[in-house]
Image (cartoon, rainbow, N blue to C red):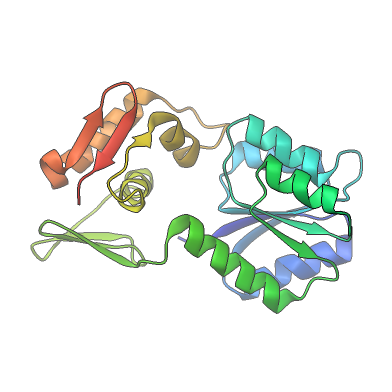
Amino acid sequence: MAISILVVEDDKLFNETLCDFLEECGYETVGVKDAKSAIEKSYYNRFDIYIFDINLPFESGLTLLKSLRESGDITPAIMLTSRDDKASLIEGFSLGADDYLKKPVDLDELELRIKALLNRVCGSINKYEVGNCIIDVSNHKVICDGTSIELSHKVFELLLLLLKANGKVVPLETIINRLWSRAEESSYGAVRVYITKLKKIFGDRIENIRGVGYRLIQ
């Protein structure tokens, strides 16, 4: 599962440079030049990271970020800016930005910032042990007593959400926002089906906190 990144930058050449560089680093990228296109792309696709220029035509990157956060989109965001004013920095973080990079952007630094952000948000652990099972994150596998168990993409993503919560409850809304794009039809019933599949593997380690969400006891 390659990490997917949405790049929003109105300078066509720089947009292409960013996308080409990130693809060489192994990421899947989509590049657009304005906020309206970004909203459309984020509606139909689920991205792992956003990279937004602040100075966009028609609508700023800060306004774009605000719109996404208000819609429940919690995707980590790195803001690109040529501004020096502290007010923009404060506003961006208050709206839910995760990091900033000042233009002109050093591409190697951008890659390091992306890796650091992924480690903070997703965790850098590649393997987990739960009871008699090993969850191999890199290879998208669950192996119990030497037997490999096939899981669909969404069920595996739900498992990772529960694992990375370290025993804390993962709210239902967080699960919905993480597993489905806004264009996809989601339902609490589907979540219950996925939880049932995980319970067949992990039994009572999967707990339903009624009206709140789920947790995995490791």
State the residue in front, 27 or 169: 169
- Percent x, y of residue 30: 68, 55
User: For the image shown, how many numbered marks are present on the structure?
Assistant: 0
Task: Answer left or right for 60 relative to 167.
Answer: right
> Which of the two residues, 3 or 128, is positioned nearer the viewer here?
128
Residue lying at 78% horizontally and 52% vertically, measured from the top left: 89
Return the residue nearer the eye: 91 or 196: 91
Query: Most extreme residue toward the top, as rendered?
Result: 211
Residue for point 76% across, 48% down: 90
Q: Residue at x 59, y 38 (%)?
A: 73
Q: In this view, does 120 lie to the left or right of 65?
A: left
Q: Position of residue 51 (x, y in %)?
A: 70, 56
Residue 19 appears in view:
yes
Residue 164 drawn above or below residue 94: below
Q: On the rendered image, what quadrant is the N terminus found in?
A: bottom left
Residue 77's x, y, as percent?
Answer: 65, 52
Q: Is residue 106 above or below residue 196?
A: below
**Is 83 drawn above or below residue 90 in the view shown?**
below
Say which quarter of the image contains residue 21. Answer: bottom right
Seen at 50% across and 60% down, the residue is 120
Q: Is residue 26 left or right of residue 63?
A: left
> Image quadrant of residue 142?
bottom left
Say which quarter of the image contains residue 145: bottom left
Query: Residue placed farthest to the bottom in the image?
Result: 108
